[in-house]
Image (spheres, helix red, strand yellow):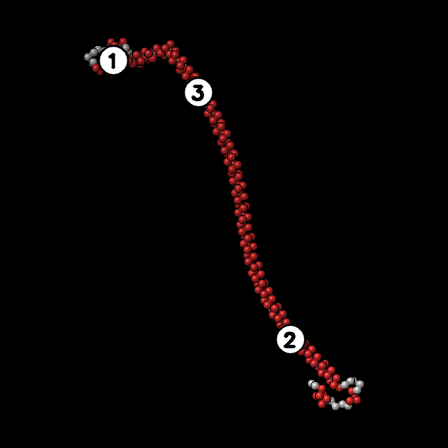
Amino acid sequence: MGAQAVKKYFTPKREEFSSHGDLEDVLEASLASAIRASTLQMKADKEHQQALEGLKAALENARAAYEQMEADLKESDSNLLNMTKQLDNANAAQKVATEALEAANKEKKRLLEETKSREEEILGLRNEVAKAESSKREAEDGKMEVEARLANAEAEFVANFHNTEAYTNFADYFARVGHQEVLTALRNDHPELDVKSLEVRFPPPDAEGEEDS
């Protein structure tokens, strides 16, 4: 609004504004004030619009962050569930391993006891074998001693056999056996011969025993 337009609507006397300065200056000051107010209002509106847009952007960012947080929370819950399952599986595997270890320790203890028993049994058998070998050596030594004594006795018997009564009896016995074989051959081969006198002269080996009885 210009100064002329202001003058058109305001027709006060000049003396009424003598204390407030020139009317045109007042109008210009009012106009400048209105322009500044309008400028400030526009600036305020612009800042308000910018603030609204910033708030909308902040709300969108907050909504996106919230949605991301929910997604992260779901993923975290899923990961936690998987970790819980893995932990349960690990606990079950550890339980199985612990039971297997306990069973292995029991089996190891049983094997150690069995091994100790076997070692004691083997030691006893070795002692028995040692005793048997010692007895065998003693028996062999005794056998060798008996064989040596028997050999000495046989050698002594053979060396002095011709001086014993048995030698005479054996010699006579085998001589009579030989005589009987000859007489038998004569009777078989020459039945015409009379060998009775020879039989009386050379009686059979058992005839002497019958005479002694």
The residue lying furthest to the left in this view is 192
Residue labelled with disc 1 = 183
Q: Which mark is residue 144?
A: 3
Verify CB contact (< 8 Å) between mark 3 and mark 2. no
- The residues bearing labels 2 and 1 have C-alpha atoms spaced at a distance of 170 Å
- Judged left or right of residue 133, residue 168 is left
Residue 189 sits above or below residue 25 on the image = above
Verify CB contact (< 8 Å) between mark 2 and mark 1. no
- Judged left or right of residue 109, residue 194 is left
Residue labelled with disc 2 = 49
Residue drawn at 53 percent across, 50 percent down:
96
Of residue 50 and residue 185, the one placed in the foreground of this image is 50
Residue 114 sits above or below residue 20 on the image = above
Residue drawn at 28 percent across, 13 percent down:
178
Of residue 154 and residue 95, the one placed in the foreground of this image is 95
Place of residue 86 in the rendered image (x, y in percent of width and height, measured from the top left): 55, 55
Of residue 213 and residue 179, the one placed in the foreground of this image is 179
- Crowding near pointer 3: few (<14 within 10 Å), some, many (20+)? few
Is residue 78 visible in the rendered image? The answer is: yes
Place of residue 154 in the rendered image (x, y in percent of width and height, measured from the top left): 40, 15
Report which quarter residue 73 is drawn in. Answer: bottom right
Residue drawn at 78 percent across, 87 percent down:
17
Is residue 204 visible in the rendered image? The answer is: no
Place of residue 67 in the rendered image (x, y in percent of width and height, measured from the top left): 59, 67
Quadrant of image for the N terminus: bottom right
- The residues bearing labels 3 and 1 have C-alpha atoms spaced at a distance of 47 Å
